[in-house]
Amino acid sequence: MARFAQGKFALAVSDISGQSFPWNEMVTQWNGLFVHYSEFESKQPQLDPKPSAADPTALTKSRPQQPSPDSLRFLSFNPLTTYAAASGLINVYSVDHQRSYGNTVRFRGPPTTSPGTGSADTVGLDGPVAGTPVVGFANIANIDGISGATICGSSGFSVVPGKYTSVTTTLAAAITDTTTTSGITLTSSTDFKTSGPFIPTINNPSGTPTNAILVGTEIISYTGISSNVLTGATRGAHGSTAATHLILAAVRNLLTPDNYYYFNSGGTATTGQIGGGGYNTSSGPVTLKTIGPQ
């Protein structure tokens, strides 16, 4: 069998550049190309990636952060206002309260400390106190004929976002639970609010003034009214549920639901539009939880 020549004086044409080089200086690349050694390129490592497994992310003993329980929220000065004479409705001013339709809220007055049992405790500026002091909350002062004990009832009250007003009308046409802004028309929009303070909240970061209407148990928020038609409307707002409403269904204006809510105290106001609560009124859950492991 004939042997191959050694190529001492031979030339070869590179598969890459097309130039001639001494045959003895040629090499074969990883892809089979016959090239001069000056043109040689190693194989890119990413063409042959190494097998990899997903990084471990789960912990054998995890302790995820638990949702924060509802806690006391101290309200501003005189946050409670009776709605009208002979009514038990009370409006509550609480900026960015984040309450939803039907939430249960309990009101409390200033904190109190009463003596406990056991040996006297002389620690602190309040003088000797028997045993471990018992911390509680006093009732707020009476407001417009409604007793503080009623307002601070231990069962709390079901609340509705928005400031309850006397401004009412009806729907000019029936709406379904999916009717959009263009179809929500009021019989009259006289005295319905279309403005308010610019107060940024969690649900409204821009602070655009937003008011609402209450139809049955549904809250429909809006940013404006044009020719009796709501603009910028949101169905089933503030935890309520969008529903079908018939023509001439009763409509009530609710103001700035991000910063107000109301409840029925079950009492009877004497005059109406009387504020109260002082500086030490707080709102919170029916039962307070201890901070730390439960």
Image: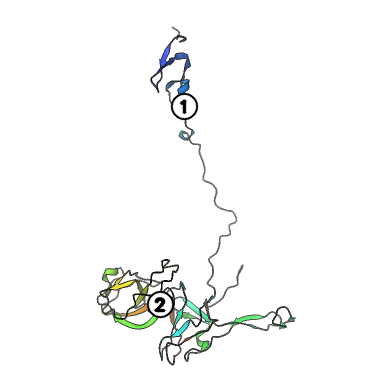
Of residues 238 and 85, which is closer to you in this image? 85
The residue beneath circle 2 is 162
Report the quarter where the C terminus lies: bottom right
Q: Tags 1 and 2 in contact by the CB under 8 Å rule?
A: no
Q: Is residue 153 above or below residue 228?
A: below
Q: Residue 127: x and y, percent?
A: 72, 83
Q: Pick the residue in front: 236 or 11.
A: 11
- The residue indicated by pointer 1 is 41
Q: In the rendered image, which quarter contains the N terminus?
A: top left
Q: Is residue 86 above or below residue 118?
A: below
**Across the whole image, how many numbered discs are drawn on residues?**
2
Q: Residue 218: x, y in percent?
A: 36, 75
Task: Tell me the amino acid under the disc marked 2.
Answer: Gly
Quadrant in the rendering for residue 251: bottom left
The mark that comes first in sequence, 1 or 2, is: 1
Q: Is residue 40 left or right of residue 218?
A: right
Residue 80 showing in the rendered view: yes
Q: How many C-alpha atoms fall within 10 Å of the one at disc 2: few (<14), some, or many (≥20)? A: many
One can see residue 179 in this view: no
Between 82 and 52, the residue placed more toward the observer is 82
Q: Position of residue 70 (x, y in %)?
A: 52, 72
Which disc, if any, is residue 58?
none
Describe residue 216's horizontal placement relative to residue 282 as left or right. left
Q: Position of residue 207 (x, y in %)?
A: 41, 69
Quadrant housing residue 168: bottom left
Quadrant for residue 290, please give it. Answer: bottom right
> Tag 1's secondary structure?
loop
Outermost residue on the top side: it is 2
